[in-house]
Amino acid sequence: MDERLERYSRQMLFAPIGEQGQQKLSESSVCVIGMGALGTVLANHMVRAGVGRVRIVDRDYVEKSNLQRQMLYDEDDVREGYPKAIAAERKLRRINSDVQIEAIVADVTVHNIDDLLEGMDLVLDGTDNFQTRFLLNDACFRRGIPFTYGGAVSSRGMSAILVPGKTPCLRCFLPSADSGGQTCDTIGVIAPVVDIVASYQAVEALKYLVEAEGARRSSLVTFDLWSNYYYEMKLGEAAKECPCCQLKEYPALQMTETDQTVSLCGRSTVQISGHGPLDLGQWRKRLEPAAAKVELNAYLLKAELPEGERLVLFPDGRVLVQGTEDIVRAKTLYARYIGY
């Protein structure tokens, strides 16, 4: 056996994959959007399985509360304040140096989604909000790229693989982006449900990449681990008036995003974008006289404010105002310390 393939020997012994399927995996490219709980499990599976190119995208950085369920991070990442994409990339490269891993620290928006999906065979959903999921859904269906949907909160999970031209899209069975206010940051989540949802997503991804179409699941799986509940809903036919997969309007791609300020649900954080690139070294000098404490690494700058909130600046121009969900107060602090 080729020495390079030795690490996949047990996977290739699985007849539906075999050596031919392993070769297909090595020639495939996938994009994991969101490197939180789901995304870390998804990226781990893709890299260990030998997918040739894995692009990982996330806007956030590692915090202590992530360690309970986000498997690629450790306490060193918290101390260093690494962006999740960078911390995950470092771990993944040590897991499999043969895989091309590309880490992108960015917020996923209508302005960059096409660039993020360029050259990808499959997109894996590791996001934590339906606005971004609908953006992924619309972009994937416009480009004809399959999209593995997954969601986990509390002890509940759901998953489906959505293939343009073969299945309905996400909007067909989840037409509203309203999550009812239930997020991991408001009602919690247990780690096992995350692992199971991401594993459902990962195995459907492998089926698609090795072209095992007959084995692919054509249903939305929902379950509750704590209450011992499991249900499968057949995806069925697309909704006749679906604005994405039927009418080809792709509403999420039509948004102008004139207001680039958003409160991150349950995070006590407001994200403000649109300033333009930030030179973190220069901003350290500007903020040190006014801030109670300033910390800088190669990827972001944190400034503890006298008012009690914290600013987190990223080179791409994004600023997180932490310690408030009040958009008016966040904009006031942003204007005071950053300016418009």
Image: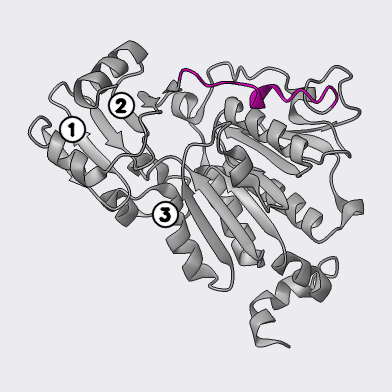
Q: Position of residue 297 (x, y in %)?
A: 25, 51
Name the one closer to the observer, 67 or 162: 162
Mark 3 residue type? Ile
- The structure residue drawn at horizontal position 36% and vertical position 35%, both measured from the top left corner, is 317
Q: Quadrant of residue 304?
A: top left
Query: Residues in magenta?
Result: 246-259
| Disc 1 packing (10 Å; few <14; some 14–19; many ≥20) | some
Q: Inspect the magenta stretch and tell me whether residue 253 lies in it.
A: yes
Residue matched to label 2:
321
Q: Is residue 114 left or right of residue 12?
A: left
Cα–Cα gap, marks 1 and 2 = 10 Å
Q: Which secondary structure is most common in the magenta stretch?
A: loop
Q: Position of residue 145 (x, y in %)?
A: 75, 44
| Disc 2 packing (10 Å; few <14; some 14–19; many ≥20) | many
- For residue 208, above or below residue 156: below
Mark 1 residue type? Glu
Q: Quadrant of the N terminus?
A: bottom right
In primary-sequence order, the first of circles 1 and 2 is 1
The answer to whether mark 1 and mark 2 are in CB contact below 8 A is no
Q: Position of residue 215 (x, y in %)?
A: 88, 53
Residue matched to label 1:
304
In the picture, the disc for residue 86 is 3
Residue 160 visible here: no
Mark 2 residue type? Val
Residue that extends furthest to the top in the rendered view of this protein: 328
